[in-house]
Structures are given as C-alpha cells and as structure tokens.
Image (cartoon, grey):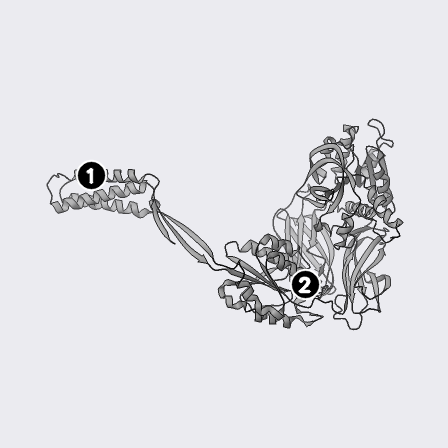
Amino acid sequence: MNSYYFGISGSWAVLIIISLALIAFSIWSYRKTVPEITPRRKTLLTVMRALALVLLLFALFEPVYTAIRGSMKEPVVVALLDNSLSMSLDDAGGDRKSGYKKSMEESALEQLGDDLIVRKFSNTVQESESFDFESLELDGSNTDLSNALGNINRSMSDENLRSIVIFTDGAFNSGDNPIYTAERLGKPVFVVGIGDSTYPKDVAIVNIITNDAVYINDKVPVNIRFDANGFEGKSVKVQFFEENIGIGETTIELTLNRTEYSVDFTYEPKTEGNKKLSIKLENLEGEITHKNNQIAKFVKVLKNKRIISFFSGSAVADISFIKNAIKNQEGIEIREFIQSLGTSFYNEPTQKDLNETEVFIFVNFPTANTSDATVQNLVNHISKGKSILFIAGRETDYNKLKKFEEFLPFNVASTRAKEFMVNVDLNPRALSNPLIRINGTDEDLNQWNNLPPIYKTETFVRIKSESELVASMKVNNVPIAEPLIMTREFQQTKSIAVMGYGLFRWKLAGHAVEVSRGRNEATDIFTLFFENSIRWLSLKDKAKQLIIKPSKQLYNVGERIEFVAQVYDASYQTVDNAIVELQIESLDETRTIIMSPINNGRYFGAMESLPAGDHVFKGTAKLGQNQLGKDDGRFTVGETPAEYLNLRMNTSLLRNLAYISGGEFFTPENANELLDAIQNHKNFKARPVTERSEFALWSQPWLLIIAILLFSIEWFVRKRSGML
C-alpha cells in the first residue's frame, strides 16, 4: 500500500489564515489604482501578487512531500560451492568430482534465477556469475567453512536472505568451527555432503606437535599423530629428519580395530638457527595417495641459558612441585627467593640475580609483608621485557599486585580472602595453545576438565583485550564465566596468570593416583603445563627494528606467498615511510620485492608462486641512507597440502550444521529433493518492505524563482500601465 502526504514545520491553520490575509492584502492593494486600469489587468496583478506572497510564505513553513511505498521482496538463497582441492580428490567411494557435478545438476537451484546468489569458497570467498560446476577450479589450499558463512552475514544485510545451501565434504582445516557461525547467522543451512564418509585405504599424518622454539642441548618431545586404515596386520616405518638428515626411526604395527596412532621422538638440537623437522611415513602399496605421508615444521633453536627466579611470600607446596616439574629441562638454572619473617628473604635477591633473571615466577607473592622497595625493584626489572608467571595464593596482596598489573593478563576487579575450590573449565578455542596442548584433539578437553579441584579466593578479575583466555572455572561442576588461566603477549613481554593455588593437587590427586592404579601412560598434566609454560615464557626475540614473517611456513605449489613486516626506529616507535626490501633465495634464483606500507609501521609484500623446495628470505629496512634493521627466515613450498590430510566426508559435522540451523542434510543421491525442501521451508517467504522517501520542497530553488518571476511580471505590467 502506497501513501503520500505533505507536511510543514508549523500549523496548517496558521498557514491558511496568513495566506488568506495575504490574498486579502493583494485584493485591497489593487482596489483603487492610479491611473485606473481595466478590471482584467487589475485581476491579473492581484493574482500575481497574491500567488508570489503565498509561495514565499509556503517556503517559510518548510513544506516536505513524503511518499511511503510498500512492496514484497522475494526470498533469496545463497549457494556456497566448496572450491578446495579436496573436492577433486578420490576417496573410498571413488571420484568426488562426479558426485559433486551430479548433485549440482539435480538440485535444480538454477531455477531460482536472480534469487540465487552463488559464491565459491576455500580459504577465501569469491562471487560466481553462474551456478555451474565448470566454473569451479577446485584448487583451494584450505577449507574455511566458518569464513564462508560469516561472509554472508557481513555482506547481505539488505537482502531477504532465507536459506543457505552448502556443497562440501565438511573437511574444514582452517578457521573456527562452522557450527558456531551458523548458529549466530540464524538462517536454515541446507547441506549437500560430497564424498564418502568411510575411511579410504590410506596412511596419513595428521599433525606434528612440538615447541616452536627450543634451546641447544635441550631435549624436547616431538609427537606425531597419524591415521591408518585398511592395512591391519602390516607395519609402517616412521622416520624423523632434521634438515633432511635422519635422526630417528621406529616401526609401528598396524592392528585391527585401531585407526589412530601416536609416535614420540626426542629432539636434541646441537646448533642454533631455524631448523626444519620432517616426519615421513613409509609408502604402502595400495594407498589412495602418498601425498599425505610426510609433514614438516620449523623450530627456532636458541643458545641462551635461562635463569628462572621464584618469588614467594611463604614456603608453599606449589613451589617445590613446580621446581621438580621443570628442573630436568636442559639449559635452565632455578633461583629461589622466599620471604621469612617481616620483609626479609631467606636468600636475599641481589641486583645481579634480578638482572640475569629471564622468567619471574610469583607464587603467593606479593604479600602484605613484602616491602614497597622490593615491589618497585621487581617492577623496574620486569619492565625491561622480562616474562612473568603469576600463581595466586591465599595471602596474596592484590593491592600491591596492582603495581605489576601492566605486565599481567588481567586487572583486579574485587578481592576477598574467603576460600573455595574450583575445577578447570578449558576453553575449546585454546586446544592449540602450546601451554596446554597434549595431542591437539578434543580428548585434551576431557583430560584437563577432569583434573582434581584446586583452591581459589574470592578474587575476580577482568581479562585484558590483548590477553587470551585459556581456561575458566567450574564450581560444583557449574561453569562460571571467570578466568582461571590466562596468557598475554604484548610489546615483547609475555605473562601467564593462574588465579588458583594448590596446583600440586593436579600431580598428587591426579597423575599420581592414575599411576598407582597401573595407568603409567596417563598424561602428567601438571608437569606438561609448567614445562611448556617455561619454554613459552623464555622464547623472546630481542627488540628488533625489523620483523618480517611469512603468512605461514609451509605453502603448496602455486599458492600465493605473503609477507608482513613491522618497522621500528631506535626508540621502538613505528616507522611508516621506510623502504623495506625483501629477497627470496631458492636454489637457482633470487627474487626481490619492495614491500608496501599499510599503516602503523606495518608493510605487506607478496608474490604469486615459487617453485617447490626450501626458501630463505632476507629483508632490510632503510630510512633515507640509514639502515634501520635486518631480518631473515625460512619457509617451504611443496609440502603436503592440508587438503590431503582428511580424505573422507565429515558427515557428523554436516548433519549437525544442518540440524542446529534448522536446515536439512542431503547427498548426491537425493539432491533432487533439495529445491522442494528449500521452497517448502516455513522460513522461505517474501518479506514486506517499506520504502520512505522525503522531498523537501522548501529547499528547492524553483519556489523562489517563481515568486521572483511573478513579482517581476507584476512590476513590468505596472510600469506599462503607468502605475510606477
């Protein structure tokens, strides 16, 4: 229904009364004229004056013409087409491409015409002009379902979006879990699953887990997880390489009713630098592909010796347990400073001790007895870029701790000494966090969340925006949205905070109990957590004026190589007008690119592709004739693409995605029912749209032009009549 009306800024009654008065004034003005003119000319002059005055008055009341038009906006469907490499591979069911093409053709979505919006996605999202299988390249190096769904939410707010259709195998290997994104989107998602959900006959490395940085002569565990299907009763050789030199080898027997395997190696570097660690599985006859039989990872080997200093307000049990957990790490020295009576320490820290300390561990520190001089001295040293691990205690003085808050992941909101017990509630997003990672699977959640409870005071904190929440807490098995474990990495400073104490219970009431029951393979989470924490806190690049990093260290052949750089001056202020030159060296050639400034001291550079192999990059930053800094690193092109690591359809994910969003799940066999399911869905309907447009008449120049023209004609007629 359409409607139109005029509006003015004042009262219509006042406008009419004044208009009548002006008309009356115009009539009165020409009641008698000198010389007398004909009635016809008198009428003409009266009308022109009255009309001109009324037009001017009308403009003064700011008239606005408003039109309200109603219409129905037809429902729109978005089709997301998986354009990743995995959609072109063979699986247990054979060629996926034929099933993909069949499902698109039989879905008949092209009948929607202009109401169908088509996008293809892999690690990025692109518009597609047609719903046509031939338009797909199927060469994307990663699958990011969450980004594909999130892109719809960001770009289609004005459309009457009613349904989303996804053609995919569900094997996402980048981004967040798409189920969470679909829930936030609030639209039914219809999923067409492509591929076979059964495991193909294959052995495939899933991941390699080790520290990103290690120290010379420091023995570091390297864990490899791989899947094996269809080779029961056979064995596979697993080889471990550093820079293509074999440093370890083992043989794993493949057994019936088991598909997941784990292998542990120990890596003990002898020289510093960026080292490439590789794992290779023996190629078995009959595998669907051999491209997923190897994986690589770069680690940084450092030569520094680490000084770890404990500070505590009293001799609490957590200190001895933490010391025992980390003392076997190579290249570390532990120093212990525990307060005695008053403000003194059993072993007084010297300035040399504080200068040499790389990581400070506060356990139940500071307390009310800690002197202000000690607090300020520690603040001065930590402000130089030292790392800090804070573990709360019953006597911790949070007023004195405020002086350390600029280095910690949180700000204190309130505190009381009342004590209660809490359990770990691990954040699922933290599964890849190097502090808590066990195997990198959902089973890690269960192991962490089943730890014995620890103690905590009624101290509540606000996590800082640049910090990462690792774990919240549960009280009486009820989740509480209050941080328990947090990390922060900001301006070359790292910190970890654990807001509970009595952590030794994880060891005594957790791991020790499991061992006493004969489960010697049980994970010692207490030791794992503190070993990983010390390694992470110890890894710090010196404040460099040029930092260059590739977007990742392992690229596929043909994949775009991207770099981001940060440039600082001597006072560590960002520099936006530097010349950043980057050289990429391979076996037979060297390529040079000049990186483009973005903002805030950041620069970007990219090249479309590089040949397979290891590559070294070297960069320099100059400001005028002065060199600000240098940086270098390594990356590899041609390693196993992530798309080869999972060659089966993730049916459970796709069914849950459809169910939670209110859509349905289809396969190529029943894809011909898809269009009817979409159109019969209760959500699929046109939406009434109301458009309101306003036209401000008073601001238009033609009102004034007409009034002036009428006054001009009136003046001309009066002059011709001899009335001037």
The residue at which mark 2 appears reads as: 651
Q: Residue at x 32, y 39 (%)?
A: 11
**Which type of secondary structure does the marked residue at label 1 adopt?**
helix
Helix, strand or loop under label 2: helix
Give the left or right position of residue 436, taking residue 579 as reference: right
Q: The residue under label 2 is which amino acid type? A: Thr
The residue closer to the viewer here, 346 or 589, is 346
Residue 198 visible in rendering: yes
Percent position (x, y) of residue 194?
Answer: 65, 67
Toward the viewer: 270 or 363? 363
Residue 706 in the image: state x and y as whole percent: 27, 47
Q: Residue flagged by tag 1: what amino acid is it?
A: Ala
The residue positioned 74% from the left and 57% from the top of the image is 634
Residue under pointer 1: 24
Residue 696 in the image, given as x and y percentages of width and height: 36, 46
Q: Is residue 492 visible?
A: no
Q: Earlier in the sequence, mark 2 or mark 1?
A: 1
